[in-house]
C-alpha cells in the first residue's frame, strides 16, 4: 500500500470507524427568531443567545441570516466529541455581543487593527464586524456569495464561542479551528463536515487567489506552532498581501488533527483538556506557567513527517502545497 493511498484512507476512516464517538456529517440550523429594538443612536437585535448592535437599521432578510449564522455556531461546535468550547463557569448564560459597524472609521475606533474587516475583542469578549465589507452593503452591489460573505463572521464567532478555551490555546490552533468552521459553513447556518476537504480547498484557493494548478506557499508547521499572538499580528502587518498564508497552514494542520482525533488518536483531546486546566490554574493562582507541550499533539511523529503527509493528501485532492520559511 503506497503512502498516498494510506493517508487518504487515514483521513476517511473518521466517518466509518465504529469505535468512534458519533462524528457530525452536517448541520442545518433552523431559521432564528429575533426582536428589533430602536434605541437613541443605534438598533438592537436580540436572539436567544445573542445581542446584536448596529449603528443603522438592517434589512429584515439580512439580519435574519446574521441571527441564524450566530446561533448556529455554538451548536455546530458542540456537535464535535472534543472540547472545542469551554467556559470556567458552565452556568454562564449571559447574552453574547456582536457589534456591526457600517462606518469604517467607527469600526477602527472600536479597537480594530487597520486592514481587518472583523475581530474578536479578547477584553470585552465581543465580536466586532465592519458590516460594509464583511457582510455586504444593501445599498451597493456586492459580489460575494453567501459562503464567503459570512466567512469572517463565522470565524470571529467561533473565537467567541470557544470561551476560556480561546485563551488556553496557542494562536495557530484557535485560528485553525475558526477557519475549519468558516470553511465548512457554506450557507447561513449550514455546515457540511463530510465535505470538509472540498470546502477547505475552495476556501484556500479563493483567499490565496490560486488557480487549480497554482502552488500554495505557506509557512512551515514548526514556524506557525512557535508563533505567539504578538508574532502573528506582526506578520499580518508585515505581510499584508499574503497574510492568509499562515491561516492556511493553521487550517491544514487543524483539519489533520480534528479529523484524526475522532478515531483512537487522543493527542488533541488531551491537549485541549490539559491546556484548559493550565489556563484555569493560572487564573486562580495568578501564577504564570508555561503552555502545555505541543508534542502531545504529534505523538510519535514529528512536524516534518506531518508536513509530508499533509502534502501527499492534498496533492491527491488537487492542491499543491509548499511549506516555506526558517524557524529557530
Image (spheres, grey):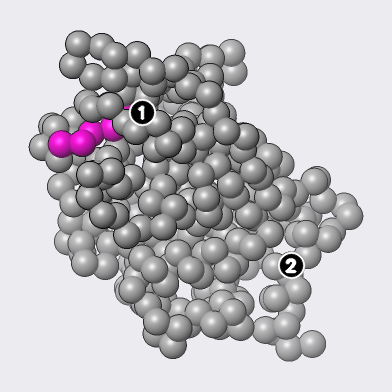
Question: Which marked residue is nearer to the observer: mark 1 or mark 2?
Answer: 1
Secondary structure state at the residue bearing disc 2: helix
Label 1 sits on a secondary structure element that is strand
Q: Which residues are magenta?
A: 98-103
Residue 285 in view: no
Query: CA separation, marks 1 and 2?
Result: 36 Å
**Could you say where residue 217 lies in the image, as x and y percent from the top left?**
36, 77
**Image position, residue 310 (x, y; %):** 56, 73
Where residue 195 appears, as percent x and y from the top left, is: 64, 63
Main SS category, magenta section? strand
Residue 144 figure quarter: bottom left
Question: For the point 70% across and 76% down, which residue is it?
Answer: 8
How packed mark 2 is, by other alpha carbons closer than 10 Å (few <14, some 14-19, many 20 or more), is few
For mark 2, what is the residue?
Answer: 12
Visible in this render: residue 86? yes
Residue occupying the point 44% across, 52% down: 146
Q: Tell me the tag on residue 98.
A: 1
Viewer-proximal residue among 72 and 284: 72
| In this rendering, position of residue 150 left or right of residue 255 | left
Q: Nearer the viewer, residue 9 or 288?
A: 9
Q: Nearer the viewer, residue 275 or 207?
A: 207
Q: In terms of image quadrants, where is residue 273?
A: top right
| Residue 269 on the magenta segment | no
Q: Quadrant of the N terminus?
A: bottom right
Q: Where residue 295 is drawn, which disc sits there? A: none
Task: Please indicate whether residue 206 sits to the left or right of residue 317 in the image.
Answer: left
User: Does residue 101 show up magenta in the picture?
Assistant: yes
- Which residue is located at x 69 percent, y 76 percent? 7
In which quadrant is the C terminus drawn?
bottom left
Query: Relative to 11, is 124 above or below?
Result: above
Amino acid at each position: 500500500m503506497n503512502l498516498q493511498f494510506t493517508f487518504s484512507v487515514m483521513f476517511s476512516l473518521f466517518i466509518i470507524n465504529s469505535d468512534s464517538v458519533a462524528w457530525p456529517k452536517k448541520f442545518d440550523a433552523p431559521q432564528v427568531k429575533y426582536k428589533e429594538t430602536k434605541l437613541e443612536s443605534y438598533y438592537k437585535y436580540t436572539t436567544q443567545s445573542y445581542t446584536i448592535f448596529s449603528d443603522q437599521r438592517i434589512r429584515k432578510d439580512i439580519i435574519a441570516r446574521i441571527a441564524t449564522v450566530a446561533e448556529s455556531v455554538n451548536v455546530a461546535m458542540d456537535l464535535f466529541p472534543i472540547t472545542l468550547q469551554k467556559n470556567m463557569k458552565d452556568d454562564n448564560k449571559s447574552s453574547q455581543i456582536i457589534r456591526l459597524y457600517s462606518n469604517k472609521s467607527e469600526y477602527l475606533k472600536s479597537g480594530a487593527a487597520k486592514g481587518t474587516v472583523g475581530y474578536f475583542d479578547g477584553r470585552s469578549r465581543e465580536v466586532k464586524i465592519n458590516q460594509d465589507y464583511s457582510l455586504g452593503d444593501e445599498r451597493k452591489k456586492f459580489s460575494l456569495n453567501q459562503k464567503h460573505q459570512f466567512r469572517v463572521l463565522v470565524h470571529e464567532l467561533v473565537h467567541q464561542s470557544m470561551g476560556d478555551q480561546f485563551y488556553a490555546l496557542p494562536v495557530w490552533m484557535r485560528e485553525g479551528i475558526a477557519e475549519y468552521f468558516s470553511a465548512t459553513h457554506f450557507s447561513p447556518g449550514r455546515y457540511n463536515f463530510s465535505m470538509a476537504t472540498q470546502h477547505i480547498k475552495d476556501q484556500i484557493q479563493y483567499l490565496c487567489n490560486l488557480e487549480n494548478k497554482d502552488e500554495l506557499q505557506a509557512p512551515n508547521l514548526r514556524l506557525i506552532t512557535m508563533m505567539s499572538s504578538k508574532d502573528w499580528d506582526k506578520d499580518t502587518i508585515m505581510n499584508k498581501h499574503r497574510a492568509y498564508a499562515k491561516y492556511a497552514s493553521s487550517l491544514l494542520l487543524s483539519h489533520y488533527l480534528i479529523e484524526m482525533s475522532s478515531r483512537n488518536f487522543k493527542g488533541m483531546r488531551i491537549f485541549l483538556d490539559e491546556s484548559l486546566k493550565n489556563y484555569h490554574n493560572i487564573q486562580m493562582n495568578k501564577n504564570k506557567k508555561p503552555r502545555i507541550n505541543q508534542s502531545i499533539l504529534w505523538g510519535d511523529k514529528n512536524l516534518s513527517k506531518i508536513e509530508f503527509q499533509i502534502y501527499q493528501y492534498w496533492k491527491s485532492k488537487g492542491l499543491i502545497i509548499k511549506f516555506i520559511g526558517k524557524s529557530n
